[in-house]
Amino acid sequence: MSLLSVRNLTTEFFSGGAWLEAVSDVSFDLRRGEILGLVGESGCGKSTVAYSVMRLLASNAQISAGEVWLEDVNLTAADEGELQDLRGSRLSMIFQDPMTALDSLFTVGHQVIETLQEHLDLNVIEARERALALLRQVGIPAAEERLNAYPYQFSGGMSQRIALAIAISCHPQVLIADEPTTALDVTIQAQILHLIRRLLVEEQGTGVLLITHDLGVVAQVCDRVAVMYAGKIVEFGDVASIFSNPLHPYTQALLNSLPSQGIARGELENIQGRVPSLADRPAGCRFHPRCSHALGVCRQETPQLRTTADGQEVACVLYD
Ligand code: SF4
């Protein structure tokens, strides 16, 4: 069942005297109890999708078309009061830098308790007990003492655990995780991803939208994946299919640039060129300047997502 439904989302930024599309006609559903990866290089529009869903766009950005539904709530039509009620309760987010979510002026205990009391009917004692349980759940050692510590007294990995404790404190239906492990070393990264899967997906049935540039992270933890390039989804499918049979040349290039995959295929390579800026998007297929399979038609026609016989979706003329 779909928890979050993104339909034909288009988001623009005002820059250089014009509105420029950062996200173009993006659609997907996030199901209960799954982790959906949104993957692509920097500048492909992944985080803009996340901030559009949360309605946390910068003042020079707007959703110009499409809708986002959290079950029966149209988030694109909700007013700020409704959004504030939803954020932190039914809809939650963690960021690459946990300090974005933590206030350096207050103890972590204060911040967890405050979130709990804002969204749940708990008195201070009940909220403190629940905060303590949450810190233990996310693996903070000596949790009772650490309730009184300030964010600067924690390492990056521990801070991300506390941000996760706040994010899950009110049992969100949907968690958006924007590059949550990019700043962490590999061991801590694996621990945080494991916590997200166990505490949210398995125990609460939460749907997680995981934004990442790292296909290795997708392989570790995601159920399905949407590959984004220059503001559009170019391939969508379950992780096993996409890793065993990538269809879009961009997905193939991303996989071949991943040491574990590229070496196994004997095709380890860097992707040539770079993602075009918003002001400089090529006509036709936006990937054509970098694509080794490009045909003449690729410069004129924009390929649409089509479903293959195997159930994968791909936007490329090679599969028309
Ligand atoms: Fe390459 Fe053409 Fe497919 Fe785009 S549509 S990915 S340029 S083959």
Image (cartoon, rainbow, N blue to C red):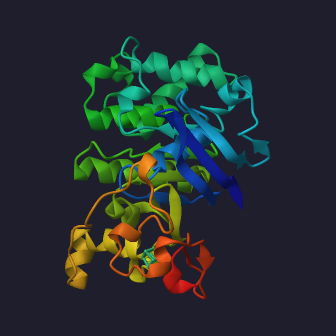
Q: Residue furthest top?
A: 105
215 lies left or right of 6:
left
Could you tell me which quadrant the N terminus lies in?
Answer: bottom right
Q: How many marks?
A: 0
The x and y percentages for residue 305 are 59, 72
How far across and how far down the image is residue 93, in percent?
A: 52, 38
Residue 128 appears in view: no
Quadrant housing the C terminus: bottom right
Residue 248 sits above or below residue 110 on the image: below
Compared to 103, does 168 lie above or below?
below
Please state the horizontal and vertical placement of residue 304, each as a whole percent of the image: 60, 71
Q: Quadrant of residue 97?
A: top left
Vertical placement of residue 43 versus 163, above or below? below
Query: In this orientation, which residue lies closer to the viewer: 89 or 65?
Result: 65
Q: Is residue 178 visible?
A: yes
Residue at figure coordinates x 45%, y 55% from the top left: 281
Of residues 320 and 27, the one nearer the viewer is 320
Q: Taking 236 as reference, is 294 above or below it? A: below
Residue that lies at the very extreme toward the bottom in this rendered image: 309
| Residue at (52, 59) in percent of width and height | 232
- From the top left corner, tell me how far across and down residue 180 is, in percent: 38, 44
| Drawn side of residue 243 relative to residue 79, left or right | left
**Which residue is drawn at the image coordinates 61% and 88% (left, top)?**
309
Q: Nearer the viewer, residue 68 or 100?
A: 68
Q: Residue at 41% across / 13% down in the picture?
A: 106
Q: Quadrant of ligand 1?
A: bottom left
